[in-house]
């Protein structure tokens, strides 16, 4: 068992050096940095494909049912990867390791280093999210899904290995989580849920598409706003004396506050609409 684990570790490092070893060529360094940092060229592209599939002609209802559960599966995969990263021992990211021969890419002068907040490298939540989304597209269209899988493999995963953000095994584990969650949620798809969602879309299109815009925006931005909200809420709670609250507790408080705020806003808009 130990010998097999040692072989896997050596293979992981060999693959990492094979990819990261190209660091130093400015065109590759800049390309990998752009692929990792540019939201429009990363999450927004995937969400644009989902919007295209939503309105594409053909078997629209069937495709929309698959899209609904694809987004649920992607969210589940992202949550599962984060929970797994919290419960297993911390794995330090390659760029913070001094004992593996990591080569630092030359970042453009205007690019600031990312603070990874001490989060574990294993598994990759990027791989989990993007492979789940790619499988969701693949279930709607084999051609579009295949392109999405290639995109996730090379544009997302390869760039993050190149930059030293992840080891190859982090990406493989994340991809397995994403693919598994996408297929499981697709298999568990409940027609009553999708029927109800599509009924809301028909009866309240303005509310539905406003909500869908916000949801897909967060997917496109990889929930960076949620992370910022967690930190801001935690800072406020610490300032007023709740020093024991961590990021998860801050997220729960922020989510509750948002639900109350949005509920109040919806009630006011509803009342204004009924009296108009």
Image (cartoon, helix red, strand yellow):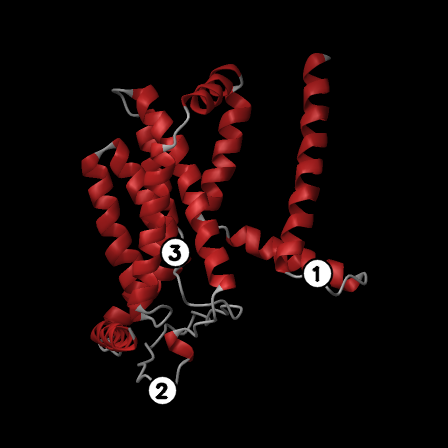
Up-down: is 158 above or below 113? above
Number of numbered tags placed on the structure image: 3
Which numbered tag is attached to residue 126? 3
Left/right of residue 200 with respect to residue 61 in the rendered view? right
Where residue 105 appears, x then y in whole percent? Answer: 32, 76
Secondary structure beneath dot 3 equals helix
Q: Residue furthest left?
A: 143
Where residue 256 appears, x then y in whole percent? Answer: 68, 42
Q: Bin the neighbour count of mark 1 within 10 Å (Cα to Cα): few under 14, some 14-19, many 20 and up.
A: some
Measure the C-alpha gap from mark 1 to mark 3.
Answer: 26 Å
- Asked if the residue at tag 2 contacts the one at tag 1, i.e. Cβ–Cβ closer than 8 Å, the answer is no
Front residue of this view, candidates 65 and 35:
65
Where residue 265 appears, x then y in whole percent? Answer: 69, 31
| Mark with earlier residue (1, 3) | 3
Where residue 257 appears, x then y in whole percent? Answer: 70, 43
Residue tagged by mark 2? Answer: 99
Residue tagged by mark 1? Answer: 245
| Mark with earlier residue (1, 2) | 2
Left/right of residue 213 with respect to residue 136 in the rendered view? right
Front residue of this view, candidates 125 and 201:
125
Up-down: is 257 above or below 60? below
Instruction: Kindly report which numbered mark, 3 or 2, lies closer to the viewer in this rendering.
Output: 2
Residue occupying the point 25% across, 38% down? 138
Measure the C-alpha gap from mark 1 to mark 2.
Answer: 35 Å
Residue occupying the point 40% across, 44% down? 74
Front residue of this view, candidates 131 and 22:
131
Which quadrant of the figure has residue 100? bottom left
């Amino acid at each position: 068992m130990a010998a097999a684990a040692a072989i896997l570790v050596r293979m992981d490092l060999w693959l990492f050096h094979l990819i990261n070893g190209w660091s130093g060529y400015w065109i590759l360094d800049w390309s990998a940095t752009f692929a990792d940092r540019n939201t429009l060229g990363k999450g927004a592209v995937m969400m644009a494909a989902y919007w295209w599939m939503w309105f594409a002609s053909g078997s629209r209802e069937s495709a929309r049912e698959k899209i609904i559960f694809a987004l649920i599966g992607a969210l589940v995969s992202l949550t599962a990867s984060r929970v797994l990263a919290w419960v297993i021992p911390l794995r330090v990211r390659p760029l913070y390791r001094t004992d593996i021969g990591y080569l630092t890419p030359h970042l453009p002068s205007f690019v600031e280093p990312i603070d990874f907040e001490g989060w574990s490298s294993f598994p990759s939540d990027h791989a989990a999210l993007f492979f789940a989304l790619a499988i969701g597209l693949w279930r709607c269209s084999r051609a579009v899904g295949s392109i999405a899988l290639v995109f996730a493999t090379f544009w997302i995963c390869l760039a993050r290995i190149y930059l030293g953000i992840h080891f190859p095994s982090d990406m493989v584990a994340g991809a397995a989580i994403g693919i598994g969650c996408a297929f499981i949620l697709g298999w568990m798809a409940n027609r009553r849920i999708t029927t109800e969602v599509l009924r809301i879309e028909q009866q309240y299109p303005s509310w539905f598409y406003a909500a869908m815009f916000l949801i897909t925006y967060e997917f496109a931005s990889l929930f960076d706003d949620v992370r910022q909200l967690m930190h801001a809420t935690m800072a406020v709670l610490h300032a007023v004396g709740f020093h024991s609250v961590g990021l998860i507790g801050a997220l729960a408080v922020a989510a509750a506050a948002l639900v109350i705020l949005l509920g109040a806003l919806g009630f006011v808009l509803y009342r204004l609409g009924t009296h108009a």
